[in-house]
Image (tube, rainbow, N blue to C red):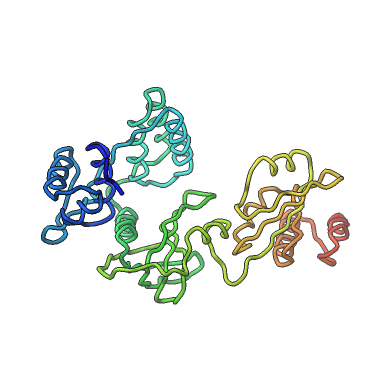
Amino acid sequence: MSKGLNRAERLRLLEKKYLYGAYTDEEMAEQVGVDSRATIYKDRQLLKDTGIPFIETERGRWKIDRQNYMSELRVNVYEAAMLYLMGRRTSRQTRSPNPYVLSALRTVALKLHQSLIDRLIASTNFIPEAEGGGEETAVLQKIINCWIDQRKIRIRYRGLQSRQSTLHLVSPYLLEPSLWDESIYLVGFSETMNKIIPFKLNRIEKAADTTQSIIPPESFDEETFIRNVWNIWSGEGELVTVKLRFRGETAVRRVQESVWHPNQAEPELLPNGDLIWTTQVAEWREMIPWIRGWGVDVEVLEPIELRETLIGEAKAIAEQYGWFVSRQDINQPQSAASDFFG
């Protein structure tokens, strides 16, 4: 399969393979299609001379030490611009100290084209400096190691509404950022709860790695999981259809400008200028902050539980400002709105 590669191409292929597995020289020779293990030995020594850290996992079997591995980044001007934009977004969203975000952005910056280096490095000024190592940094290190090496991890976790912490033995399947803020989640199977749970990293109080290896089940499909969630919560049971009506030229144009969710249907523009927007999600409660942000420009049509929740919030907001609403049939938005003003 790999015969005919020149040495430079073969070295790049070896580097990729050693990153993800341990091989004897004979096994690697077969992998890349060369006739002699001596050739692989010389190639591996050449890679070591360039600074790539190798470790011997057992006698005669080699792999790259990923914890000490520094990759070379080669990008063209367009790719560099995209990395710059991703870096700017990350720096603006990161409001708590995270030494790895800081060092990663500065490392990426030094690999970009000269005109972008200073701009991206300057953007790291948005990120607060961490004082010392910190427990959060230690937790993050253990989680990353266990996730990459596919080992179980023990954590002590306190949920947002929990009065006390809970111990979990977790099989880490996915490390995923929040779409709407700087949060990072560990998605994995908790043996304590006997189900897959997203754990918010800054709510993990302690973490301890283990030597227990895991194999993610075939039933967990990362692509399907990410496609069906609004942010990170997977919910229970079947997907829920969420249907919203947007009003006003500005709001309608803004909705049409973006793809807000992978499952969204083609928006339906009504004759009066309103727009019907529909998607399917695993957990509709995650959408509430986003819907709130549209204010009076949006009305929830489905599901009824989400509509009731927003009606209840509107009533509570009105009462907070001294307006009292006698709630009528929630399926008659006009009567509810007119009753709002008496």
Position of residue 232 in the picture relative to residue 17 (left or right): right
Position of residue 197 in the picture relative to residue 305 (left or right): left
How far across and down, in percent of the image, does residue 52 sit? 20, 43
Of residue 180 and residue 216, the one placed in the foreground of this image is: 216
How far across and down, in percent of the image, does residue 126 sit? 43, 37
Of residue 193 and residue 266, the one placed in the foreground of this image is: 266
Give the quadrant of residue 328: bottom right
How far across and down, in percent of the image, does residue 136 sit? 34, 55
Residue at 48%, 39% (x, y): give it. 89
Residue at 43%, 72% (x, y): give it. 164
The mark total stands at 0
Q: In this view, does 105 lie above or below 133?
A: above
Position of residue 229 in the picture relative to residue 303 (left or right): left
Residue at 46%, 52% (x, y): give it. 177
How far across and down, in percent of the image, does residue 230 sit? 58, 57
Of residue 21 and residue 111, the one placed in the foreground of this image is: 21
Position of residue 54 in the picture relative to residue 237 (left or right): left
Q: Is residue 257 above or below residue 32?
A: above
Q: Quadrant of the C terminus?
A: bottom right
Q: Spot the residue most to the top.
A: 115
Residue at 37%, 73% (x, y): give it. 167
